[in-house]
Image: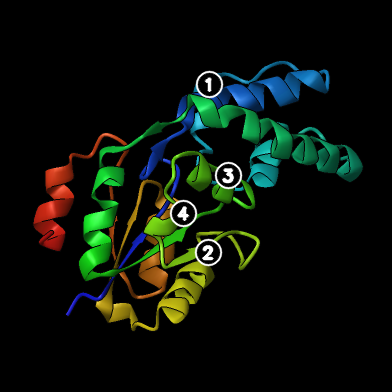
Amino acid sequence: MLKAVLFDLDGVIVDSEPGVAKMFQRVISEFGFPKPKEAEIHSHFGKPADETIRLLLPEVKDRELLARMHERTVTATLETIPYMRLAPVAGLLPRIKESHKVALVTNRRASAYNVLAHFALTNCFDAVVTHFDAPAKPAPDMIRLALGRLGVLHKQAVYFGDQQVDLLAGNAAGVKTYLVGPRTKEDFYSKLLLV
């Protein structure tokens, strides 16, 4: 019996791609490097910011410089929140929570809480697990931690993500995983979750 529903944040609950791509372009150019193309940034979407910077700038080996760039993404990420849009599933969260436990599992760190607060979604989740809490996806640790916080078994949950890292993490945790996107219609979730 299905008892819990887990969601990724970016690309599932909110459409953040345009703002996040511009954030990486801005941060990288602030440090004197050419702006990467949006397509290149999108190919790394869903990975932690520090990893994305390393992938976008493989020639940079200076760890201190990479750390400063990553630190700048923390404040720059907050600047992108007003440009995000809620995905259709966000409107279903209160109904889903009436019959299921609900968790957010995201590779974001502290900014996840800022996004939830901005959209008044904080109370829609029984548990929030970020990259501060456990190793980033594709490792299954965050999903397992969310299951533990919700008090459910892996076979009693489903997970909705939008990237390959989500599929890998969900499968490794033994949770039925669906890849969706910010434009996935409400009726897909309604039929699947019977809400």
Q: How would you rate the neighbour count of disc 2 (Cα within 10 Å): few for under 14, some for 14-19, many for 20 or more?
A: many
- Label 4 with label 1: CB-CB less than 8 Å: no
Choose top left, top right, bottom left or bottom right for residue 76. top right
Q: How busy is the neighbourhood of tag 3: few (under 14 within 10 Å), some, or many (20 plus)?
A: some
Q: Residue 114 bears which disc, if any?
A: 3
Name the element at disc 1: helix
In-image side of 170 versus 130 (left or right) = left
Question: Which of the two discs, 4 and 2, labels the residue nearer the N terminus?
Answer: 4
Amino acid identity at mark 3:
Asn
Which label is found at residue 151?
none
Residue 154: image x %, image y %?
Answer: 33, 79
Comes first in the chain, label 3 or label 4: 3
Which mark is nearer the camera, 4 or 1? Answer: 4
Identify whether 140 is placed above or below 136: below
The residue positioned 17% from the left and 80% from the top of the image is: 1
- The residue under label 4 is 122
Left or right: residue 89 versus residue 125 is left
| Percent x, y of residue 42 | 49, 31
Label 2 or label 3, whichever lies nearer to me, is: 3
Please tell me which of labels 1 and 2 falls first in the chain: 1
Tell me the residue at 11%/45% (across/down): 187
Secondary structure of the residue carrying numbered label 2:
strand
Q: Label 2 belongs to which residue?
A: 129
Give the mark toward the camera: 1 or 2.
Answer: 2
Q: Nearer the viewer, residue 44 or 103?
A: 103
Secondary structure of the residue carrying tag 3 is helix
Residue 11 x/y as whole percent: 39, 40
Which amino acid does the dot numbered 2 rest on? Val
Amino acid of disc 4: Thr
Marks 1/2: CA distance? Answer: 28 Å
Give above or below for 171 relative to 155.
above
